[in-house]
Image (spheres, rainbow, N blue to C red):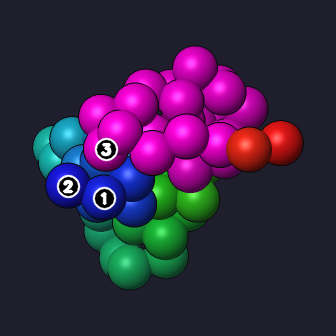
Amino acid sequence: MNPQEDIWSRVKRDIGNLAAADPSQITRAVKRRLKQIRYRPDAVDGCLAGTGLVMNG
């Protein structure tokens, strides 16, 4: 898997049981989860580590 697939997998797992009344609720849930992941560098690093890629920075 590439890092993006791992991130989306985490998002889908977290919102998989969401009973949304309309598409805007799904959009908000996805944005909220992506924001949470963004502020957890360890989660992003874990996604990268699974691919064998390294960040130069």
Image quadrant containing the N terminus: bottom left
> Vertical placement of 44 versus 15: above or below?
above
Contact? badges 2 and 1 (CB < 8 Å): yes
Left or right placement of residue 12 versus residue 47 in this view: left
Q: What kind of residue is marked 1?
A: Asn
- Please state the horizontal and vertical placement of residue 36, each as a whole percent of the image: 62, 35
Q: Earlier in the sequence, mark 2 or mark 3?
A: 2
Badge 3 amino acid? Thr
Please name the residue that numbered disc 1 is placed on: 2
Camera-side residue of 52 and 17: 52
Measuring 35% from the left and 39% from the top, which residue is drawn there? 52
Callout 3: few (<14), some (14-19), or many (20+) C-alpha neighbours within 10 Å? few
* Image coordinates for residue 50, horizontal then vertical, percent: 30, 34
Q: For residue 1, which numbered disc appears in the image?
A: 2
**Mark 3 vs 1: CB contact within 8 A:** yes
Residue at disc 2, secondary structure: loop
